[in-house]
């Protein structure tokens, strides 16, 4: 089980006063759980923005609150999109002995051989929902595109390589990646068929068209 660690201090400031501390380089956050209640904390804004940039919904974060570590998952982030910085983060404490449900991101790897045939690749899901004990939860799932060799080849959720102890909750027939005809090919084929259907077919030429009485 991979994780990162963030140092935190308890916070007793709420409301508008939080803005003052943000300008001092602090990031407000909350650590909450069934047995811990809600613990408002401060994080170092620079460290948190850097560390959490690559953290997904199934990546564990150890939040060390003044010497007490909590194993958590990031459940919500508020972001300033103009400055591309975090405004607030919610961390949920995860009981290590209980199963949990969460989304795990998919990572596409390799190249589909079908692309060398002039075909195209379309993608569907970018994450799947799974259930497992925290120790078995992967931070991501790799999708091997090299098995896509021909027109119509397809990878579905049920084809994903899940670690032992991890159960897929997403519909197994949901599409992850599929090989299709190039854009416009279907339209061209339909246009050709329509043109052929529009031409009259001569079954038998009448004699009246050939003879002059």
Image (cartoon, rainbow, N blue to C red):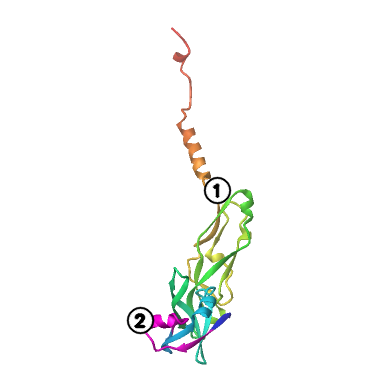
Q: Is residue 122 above or below residue 13?
A: above
Q: Nearer the viewer, residue 133 or 90?
A: 90
Q: Is residue 118 above or below residue 69?
A: above
Give neighbour class at mark 2: few <14, some 14-19, many 20+ (Cα, 10 Å). few
- Position of 102 with respect to 138 (left or right) is left
Q: Is residue 17 magenta?
A: yes
Q: CA distance from mark 2 to mark 1?
A: 54 Å
User: According to the image, label 1 marks what residue?
Assistant: 182
Q: Is residue 174 above or below residue 167?
A: above
Q: Which mark identifies residue 211?
A: none
x, y percentage for residue 204? 48, 22
Q: Nearer the viewer, residue 212 or 169?
A: 169
The tag earlier along the polypeptide, 2 or 1, is 2
Q: Nearer the viewer, residue 155 or 116?
A: 116
x, y percentage for residue 74? 47, 78
From which residue to which does the magenta span run? 6-30
Regarding residue 133, the answer to whether it shows in the image is no
Q: Which mark identifies residue 16?
A: 2
* Nearer the camera: disc 2 or disc 1: 2
């Amino acid at each position: 089980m991979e994780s990162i660690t963030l140092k935190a201090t308890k916070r007793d400031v709420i409301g508008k006063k939080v803005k003052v501390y943000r300008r001092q380089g602090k990031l407000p956050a909350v650590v909450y759980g069934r047995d811990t209640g809600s613990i408002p904390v401060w994080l170092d804004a620079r460290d948190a923005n850097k560390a959490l940039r690559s953290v997904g919904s199934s990546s564990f974060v150890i939040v060390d609150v003044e010497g007490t570590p909590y194993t958590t998952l990031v459940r919500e982030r508020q972001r300033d999109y103009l400055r591309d910085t975090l405004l607030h983060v919610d961390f949920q404490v995860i009981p290590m002995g209980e199963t949990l449900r969460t989304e795990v991101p998919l990572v596409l790897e390799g190249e589909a051989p079908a692309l060398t045939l002039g075909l195209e690749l379309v993608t569907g899901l970018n994450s799947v929902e799974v259930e497992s004990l925290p120790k078995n939860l992967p931070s991501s799932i790799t999708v091997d595109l090299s098995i896509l060799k021909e027109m119509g080849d397809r990878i579905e959720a049920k084809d994903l390589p899940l670690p032992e102890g991890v159960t897929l909750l997403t519909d197994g027939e949901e599409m992850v990646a599929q090989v299709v005809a190039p854009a416009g090919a279907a339209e061209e084929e339909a246009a050709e068929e329509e043109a052929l259907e529009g031409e009259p077919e001569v079954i038998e030429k009448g004699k009246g068209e050939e003879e002059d009485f």
